[in-house]
Amino acid sequence: MILTNLKALFISITCLTLTACSLFDIQPLDGTSNVIKIYDAYEHLEHCVYVDELIGSEGTWYNYLFISNKDLTLGSIHDLKNQANAMGANAIHIQYNLSFNTSVTFFAQAYHCP
């Protein structure tokens, strides 16, 4: 009986440990999204065409304690770039950071520039 309980406990801990490894991953950058430029001033975008609004976010209530602020920020930037790339944009203007305790979130606009 004790051996059966120990086996069940061991299997449960192993499963939890294996699934917890995925908590540390951030959003990857798509292969073609690395060419997207990020700007913080509209002057660079005056000859560009507005495409759409973007909200990029990384982190959740259950994993933010295990991921560094740098990685949370990088994951959020990757999210913005991937979304912009999917829209056909090649530039992003980050307007502001939305403050949350458990994630990094940016509000931005996507543009297509010549």
Image (cartoon, grey):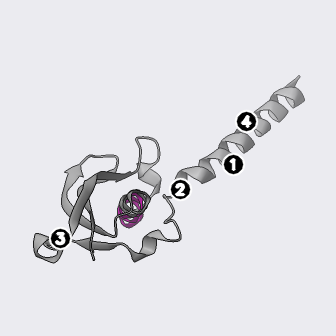
- Above or below for 8 versus 13: above
In this rendering, position of residue 76 left or right of residue 95 = right
Q: Is the C-beta separation of discs 2 and 3 under 8 Å?
A: no
The residue sitting at 54% across, 57% down in the picture is 25
For disc 4, the neighbor class at 10 Å (few under 14, some 14 to 19, many from 20) is few
Name the foreground residue: 50 vs 59.
Answer: 50
Q: Which residue is mark 3?
A: 40
Name the foreground residue: 16 vs 111.
Answer: 111
How far separated are the C-alphas under marks 4 and 3?
Answer: 48 Å
- Rendering quarter of residue 60: top left
Instruction: Give, as a three-letter code, the residue at label 1.
Output: Leu
How far separated are the C-alphas under marks 1 and 2?
Answer: 11 Å
Q: Which residue is mark 4?
A: 12
Q: Which residue is mark 1?
A: 18
- Rendering quarter of residue 94: bottom left
User: Which secondary structure dominates the residues rendered in magenta?
Assistant: helix
- Helix, strand or loop under label 4: helix
Q: Quadrant of the C terminus?
A: bottom left
- Helix, strand or loop under label 2: helix
Foreground mark, 4 or 3, reads: 3
Residue 80: image tag: none
Instruction: Give, as a three-letter code, the residue at label 3.
Output: Asp
Q: Earlier in the sequence, mark 1 or mark 3?
A: 1
Tell me which segment is drawn in magenta. 69-79
The residue sitting at 49% across, 66% down in the picture is 29
- Helix, strand or loop under label 3: loop
Name the foreground residue: 85 vs 47.
Answer: 47
The mark total stands at 4
Q: Is residue 48 visible?
A: yes
Q: Earlier in the sequence, mark 4 or mark 3?
A: 4
Q: Which residue is mark 2?
A: 24
